Structures are given as structure tokens and as C-alpha cells.
Image: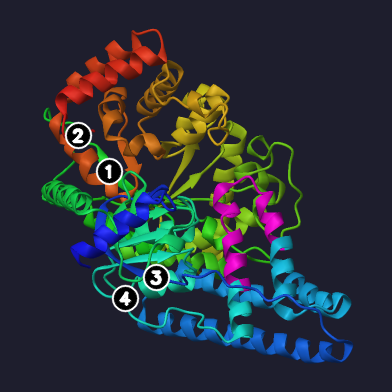
Amino acid sequence: MSAGDYEDRELFESDGVHDRHYQGVGAAAGIAVGRAFIVDRRRVRTPKYHLEPDAIEGEILRLETALKLSEHQLDHIYEKLKADGAAGEEHLLILEAHRLMLRDEMLVTTVRHLIHEDAINAEWAIRRTVRKIKKIFDDIDHEYFRERRGDVDFVGDRIVRNLMGQVVDVDEAPPEDAVVVAHDLSPADTVVLGRFPIQGIVTDVGTATSHSAIVARALGIPAVVGCGDITERAGQGDVVVVDGTHGVAIVTPTPDEIDSYRRARNQHLAQEKALLANRDLPAETTDGHRVHLYGNIEFTAEVPVVCDHGGEGIGLYRTEFLYLGRRDLPSEEEHYRAYAEILTALSPRPVTIRTFDLGGDKVPYTGRRQEPNPAMGLRALRLCLKEPEILHTQLRAMLRASVHGNLSIMFPMVSGLSELRWALALVDQFRAELQEEGQEVSPAVKVGSMIELPSAVAVADQLARECDFFSIGTNDLIQYSLGIDRQNRDVAYLYRPLHLAVLRMIKQVVDAGKDAGIPVAICGEMAGEPALTPILLGLGVDRLSMTAATIPLVKHVVRSVSLSECKELVEQACALGTVDEIERFVRDEVQARFPDLLT
């Protein structure tokens, strides 16, 4: 692009018709400057027309053909990716879920019914049906599963495009300097694009838990999602800036902006390179106190990124993806394959797998109704108490997979000793059951409890005596203890990790763990905040588990401070009265020590 092109753009901007700057959601940290590679630039324009009575059967046949073609396309992608090992088990499961949607009675029967009864064309019938199904997802309060409504869109788009004879999947390899610009990326698109050295991803829609965001993090590609209408603004080959750290994207940046972001990118890469030079050094304070840094992941594809950033293992492996887009619960074999894959990939490094952490209303097709207050309702371990077959299947699979690596099992939403004992008894029961069947189970499996409820904090001393480790889920602990929902804009400002009550609860859990001789980890967002690292060290936390990209910086902080000064920092902070005072004190102290890194 020439300087003249930029001038033309500036004249265009001066009309005030468009803005080149987009504030979205930073889905994967880092900065990229590249050329726009448009994927599915245009939304599918759906024709709408009524049918003559004698055209209805022909329309049904057209629909059936498009469904078969769609399934064939997904089969082809699935088999190709499986054959060349380009996708992890979880990506294949998502593709499988899309294939199942194509056969879903609610989708197919409703579309057929609309064509017959309302005499409308197939494309229109599909759009109406997809909107109906998406409403079901819209009512789900769990962000991760609410984002799965995008999968319904992807399936609907595929059928409509096939009805209209359009290109459905990415049909060309992007250039090396490509920034992928899309309304959204389907799972099929992301696994295919992930095979090429693209520089960044920006999308119109999506959140931090959308598929595009998850894949971008897994691949270590800077990404900004939820930019609104950026596909309407960007043209093929336009220069695009992606600032995944701050959630900013710029289309056709000015030469000054390009220079500025390239400098920032070079600085970021230099900083990252310097930090990664210490990747294999222990996370040890200047006075010899050792802590352990792990990664939080959802997909096996994220494992190499964790290792490349110096992660010593996986501190939290979420298993929600196994429940995507299903009519029924995943089988023991499906669980086993997923767990065996990740344990094998990490062996002998430790992997902590969290058991089912959803409510029944979060899993589509299980038929459960929305609860009035699902965050406080039947979810996670308490749902498994009511429907033990969920945990039965999952625990047997985990124990079978344990021979492939270093497994720890973690139970979420434990409120007291009786629940923990029930879960531990199941582990013993299934271990004996499997051994009677002649199946090998590792004798070294550790079993621990997440601490995310104030009641669990209050009885942490009891819990600590009966499990092998604690992991504090600070996101939920803060919300439950302060009585706020951070998704609620009216009260989100009250989400304050440095609230004295939160600090005291973490200290209480750490003390209970030390008295019982078990390690205490943090697996919530606090673990990945470098500014909070000295506080967590001073509170006595043994392990921190976070997204891969933050591990090097947290390690740098650990290696730059002494445990004694961290303890002193905590003592001074906890002597202050308000959360504002604590935050100001900690910020000033950390800023003075790390002026360049913690901006």
C-alpha cells in the first residue's frame, strides 16, 4: 500500500463515515501488524420467498441435498485433520458436534415443517429455526456455553451457503503476514487456519470464551474479538493492527500508528524474548523460596504453548468442551481419550483435571430447566450428588487414563466435608472396580478440592486433613464472598481481589493447608496478575496456575523479590482499612519495583 493510499484513507476518514479504530475484547495478548486476509467477509444474505404448493417437495429435496453436502464437507475436514494430526481431540469433538447438529431433530424437523406449513424457501426456514434455537442458548447464564450459540450459527450458515452454491470453507492459504479478519471463525476455519503462520485475528463478534479466542490463545496469536463491524471496514490486503493486550484493532492505520505499533511489538517481543530466556529457570525468590507455575487450559492444543512459556504442568484443565452440543452425556471412552491425550502429552509433568463444573441447565439437550439463580443452584459437585452417573463416568475415565501420566483430580464447588468425603469415596470405589476388571490404575493419583465458597474456607482445616491439595478458585471466591456478580455492570466495580476479606480468606486456606502438610494453589485470575504476585507469595501460596502468556512475567516477578519482603508487604497491606487504600499501596509498591513491566 502506498503513501497515497493512506492519504486517500485519511480523506475518507475525514468524512466521519467510518472510524478506523475498534475497541473489542483482548482475546490473546500480543501485537501484530499485517495485511487483512478476509474470511467470510460478507454475512450470508438470505433470500426469502414463498413457494407455490407444487414446489414444496422440490424444496425439501433441495434441503436434503444441502444437508448431505454439509455433512460431507465436515466429514472431509474431520478425517483430514484427524489423519494429519492437525487438531486435538477437543477440536475434533467440536466438529463432531456440528455434524450431530446437522442431524438434530429440532433443527431438521422444524425446517421441514416450516417449508411445508408456511410454504417458505429452505434458506428462510433455516434462519427462522436457527434464531429459535439460539434463544435457548441466550437464556444460559454461563458465558462459555452461551457462546456456543455461535456453533448453531455456523451450522446454519453452512447449510444456507450450500443451498446458495457459495464457498463454505477457507479455500486458500493465507500469506505469512496475514491478519485474519472475519465476522466470526467457525471451528473448522480455525483449525485449518491454525496450520498457517498467521500474524493475528480480529472478528466482529465473540468474547474471551468464543472459539476464535480459545484457538488464538492456544496458538499464541494476538487476537481481538467483538469489534462490531470491522469486516465492513477492512478490505483484502489492508494494513491492520491487532493489539490483543489492550483489545484494540486499527484498520488502515496511519504511518505514525504503524511505526508506533511496530515499535511496541518489537519491544513486546524483546521483552518476551528476555523473559523466555529464563523459561527453564525455577520460579524461586531471591531468598530461595520455590513456587511452581502452571498453565490453565481448555484444549490439548494449548499444551505446547504452556510448555514453551515455562509452565511446569497444567494446574487447571477444564473439561466443559466434552459436553458441547450433545443430546446425551459423553461416554466413558470419550472422556478417557481426552484425558489420556493430555496426560501423555505432558508426562511426567503434573496435570490437574477438574471434574464436571456445570449446572444441568448449562448443558444443552439434557432437558433441565433454567434455574432462578443458577450460580447458587444445582451445579458442579452438587449436581453430581443428585445425578451420580455424571461423575461415575468421568472418574472411571480419569482413573483409567492415570497410567498415561501424572494425574491430579480436582473437585469444584465443595461446600463442606460431607461432599468431599462422598467424592473421595467414589474415587476409592471406582479404583477398586477398575482393578477388579483387570484395568491398571496409577497408585499416585492425587485428589484435591477447589476452594471457591466461603463455607469451604471456614472448614478448610477439616478439608485439608482429607485431601492431597487445595486450589483456590479466586474468581468465584471473590464473587461469592463479596456477594457480587461481575457480569452485572451495576455491581461489577465491587469485584476487588485486594479486598481485605479476600486476602484474609486466602491466608486462612494457606494456613490450613500448611497445618495439614498439603500444597495450596491459586487457579483463578489473581494467579496471572503480575502486580499481585508479591501479595500471593507473601500470603504463602505454593503454586500459581494461569494462562500461558502470563507465566514468563509472573516468573520474572517471583525471581525478583524475596519472600521476606513479600510477607512484609502483605502485613502492611492488611493493616490498612479500605480496599482503596490497599490497592493504592500495592500499586505504588509494585510500580516502584517494576516500572516498565507492570504498566
x then y, percent, for residue 121: 76, 80
The residue lying toward the viewer, choosing from 272 and 317, is 272
Task: Answer left or right for 382 relative to 246.
Answer: right
Residue highlighted by disc 1: 293
Q: Earlier in the sequence, mark 1 or mark 2?
A: 1
Disc 3 element: strand
Q: Is residue 303 magenta?
A: no
How far is disc 2 from disc 3 in space, using C-alphas?
A: 42 Å
Disc 1 element: strand
Residue 174: numbered disc: 4
Find out whether the residues at labels 1 and 2 contact each other: C-beta distance under 8 Å: yes
Residue 248: numbered disc: none
Q: Residue at x 65, y 63 (%)?
A: 329
Q: Residue at x 77, y 75 (%)?
A: 111
The residue lying toward the viewer, choosing from 412 and 82, is 82
Residue highlighted by disc 2: 558
Q: What are the residue bounds of the magenta stretch?
A: 133-156
Residue highlighted by disc 3: 38
What quarter of the picture does the C terminus occupy? top left
Q: Earlier in the sequence, mark 4 or mark 2?
A: 4
Q: Earlier in the sequence, mark 2 or mark 3?
A: 3
Q: Is residue 138 magenta?
A: yes
Q: Compared with residue 527, is residue 54 higher up or lower down, i.e. above or below?
A: below
Q: Earlier in the sequence, mark 3 or mark 4?
A: 3
Kind of residue indicated by mark 1? Leu
Can you tell which of label 4 and label 1 is closer to the viewer? 4
x then y, percent, for residue 208: 45, 50
